[in-house]
Amino acid sequence: MDHERDIDASKGKESGDADSNGNIIISHATSAAYWRHVGSSQTQKLRPSNENPLDNCARPKLFPEIFTSSFPAFLERPINLLVPDKRFTRIDSNLNTHIAPSTVPQRSYFNLAPRLYACSPEFTTVQLSRFRSLAQLIEQISELTADYYIHPRTGALKRRSQRIASRESITAFANEAISMRGARKVTEAASYALEHARSPMEIKAGLLIGLPLQLGGFRFPTPTLNYQVSSETLRNAIEQDYFLVDIAFPESKVGVEYYGEDTHPDDAADRRRLNGLRALGWKILTLEKLQLYDVDLFLIFMRQLSLLLDQRIKTAPGWIDRHMKLRADLKLLRVHMTAR
């Protein structure tokens, strides 16, 4: 069942007609959750609203029963809504309302269903900048510009045929909305974000590797996620036209393959793929979940990567504290865990 059918089924008897109840605009963490779970088929149908939904905003006491929906964006509490002014504000354990800026750029709202709107991925990013550290905001932008979504029923990672945002679109929105609180922070965060991820762990690993020392990273060259390697030069010796490398350093022909619970399920095919990459001159390291979460094991991995990249590991005064803060922001602080 897609999100529109969830929404239609949950309107209930209170929904009434659109004119009497007005519009609902999900924002902040609620719209972020929506964009995290919306699939490719729905993404292709969505279009920015040509109207400002705040011009006919529902009052809090008239909010329909849409939030009984089982769609994940509506299960997380409190639900965040955008409202035009103080007359519409309400804060309780289930609901937070936020007063909208007086002016916003075009493409700020998407119409999801009758009377239901979401703040765009770009607008959502600026909203969340007030509540996120710089590292968390970088991760957020990397998720919004990824090639995957989280299936709303199963929680499985699924591929997106069309991304919902890019670093360029987020930067352009923030520059246009530069007077909004947090917009400058968004432009800085976007400059560090990693696009085209196919899993959350690729983002976390890539940020640990490439972020600068002042943010707690190792300051290695910024990796490219899911880099496409053509096999045209060895067409007769390799069974595929191209390979994707999870975390790649193309100039050095060095790659990192992340092996998690749901990645690389076909061992035999994966071994053939690694053979093909090696035949094309690539040096490949593997990274497992245990290594990523364990501080000491990850340092050993970084030493191995430094040898392949001919890149010396550098630190600075206070770096250990900043690195641990980065791990906390990325939720990578479990030092001891069982491999899965």
Image (cartoon, rainbow, N blue to C red):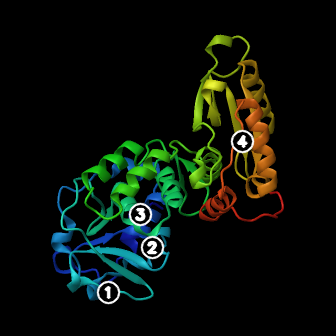
Which quadrant of the structure image shows residue 219? top right
Q: Secondary structure at mark 4?
A: loop
Which of discs 3 and 1 lies nearer the camera? The answer is 3
> How many numbered discs?
4
Which badge, 4 or 1, comes first in the chain's sequence? Answer: 1
- On the image, the x and y values in percent for residue 325 come to 63, 63
Q: In x, y percent, where is residue 16?
A: 24, 80
**185, 202: nearer the viewer:** 185
Mark toward the start of the polypeptide (3 vs 1): 1
Asked if residue 235 shows in the view, the reply is no
Quick one: label 2 or label 4, which is nearer the N terminus?
2
Name the residue located 38 percent from the left edge and 75 percent from the top edge: 80
Residue at the far front: name it.
Answer: 317
* Dot placed on the residue nearer the N-terminal end, 4 or 3: 3
**Label drawn at residue 90:** 1
- Say what amino acid the circle numbered 4 marks: Ile
Compared with 16, 47 (above or below) is above
Could one spot residue 284 in this view of the protein? yes
Which is more toward the observer, 312 or 261?
Answer: 312
Q: Which residue is mark 4?
A: 313
Left or right, residue 15 beside residue 325 = left
Lower sequence index among marks 3 and 2: 2
